[in-house]
Image: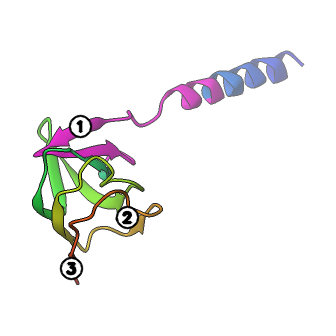
């Protein structure tokens, strides 16, 4: 019985520790595009700053604090803070689009290009 309690205690501590240790939620801005981390190697475009205009080229890889992240997703409403984007180029690394990313207040959008 004593061994069982000791073993159970170790398992509970391990479970608590694993719940506390998780990927850090990283949010950052690079060249007017805001990102948040999905895991330790990939990010989602969160939103585009209101000062951004013209042709939006979403990079395949973005660097923040000397760490490279692959851009793999686009967040719903990512253009809601700007209405001056004329075109968007989406890299082949993007494999997920969460909701309606394009139609929030963007009256100038004329072209969407998706890389092969």
Above or below residue 76? Residue 55 is: below
**Helix, strand or loop under label 1:** strand
Question: Nearer the N terminus, badge 2 or badge 3?
Answer: 2
Q: Nearer the viewer, residue 94 or 14?
A: 94
- Structural crowding at the residue carrying mark 3, measured as other residues with C-alpha within 10 Å and reported as few (<14), some (14–19) or many (≥20): few
* Magenta highlight on residue 32: yes
**Helix, strand or loop under label 3:** loop
State the scheme by which the image is colored. Answer: rainbow
Q: Which residue is mark 2?
A: 103
Which quadrant of the figure has residue 76?
A: bottom left
- Structural crowding at the residue carrying mark 1, measured as other residues with C-alpha within 10 Å and reported as few (<14), some (14–19) or many (≥20): some
Q: Give how far across and how far down residue 4 sits, in percent.
A: 83, 23
Q: Residue furthest top?
A: 2
Magenta-drawn segment: 15-40
* Residue 28 numbered tag: 1
- Which residue is depicted at the point 31% across and 67% down? 94
Q: Residue furthest front?
A: 107
Figure quadrant of the N terminus: top right
- Structural crowding at the residue carrying mark 2, measured as other residues with C-alpha within 10 Å and reported as few (<14), some (14–19) or many (≥20): some
Above or below residue 14? Residue 103 is: below
Above or below residue 2? Residue 55 is: below
* Residue 115 numbered tag: 3
- Which residue is depicted at the point 69% across and 28% down? 11
* Magenta highlight on residue 30: yes
Q: Is residue 15 left or right of residue 106?
A: right
- Which residue is depicted at the point 53% across and 26% down? 20
Image depth: mark 2 or mark 1 in front:
2
Q: CA distance from mark 2 to mark 3?
A: 20 Å
Is residue 59 visible in the rendered image? The answer is no
Q: Give how far across and how far down residue 116 sits, in percent.
A: 23, 84
């Amino acid at each position: 019985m004593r061994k069982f309690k000791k073993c159970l205690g170790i398992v509970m501590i391990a479970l608590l520790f694993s719940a506390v240790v998780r990927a850090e939620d990283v949010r950052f801005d690079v060249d007017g595009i805001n990102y948040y981390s999905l895991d330790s190697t990939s990010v989602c475009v969160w939103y585009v700053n209101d000062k951004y205009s013209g042709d939006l080229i979403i990079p395949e890889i973005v660097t923040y604090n000397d760490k490279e992240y692959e851009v793999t997703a686009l967040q719903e409403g990512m253009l809601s803070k700007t209405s001056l984007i004329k075109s968007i180029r989406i890299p082949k690394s993007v494999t997920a689009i969460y909701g309606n990313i394009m139609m929030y207040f963007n009256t100038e959008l004329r072209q969407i290009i998706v890389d092969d």
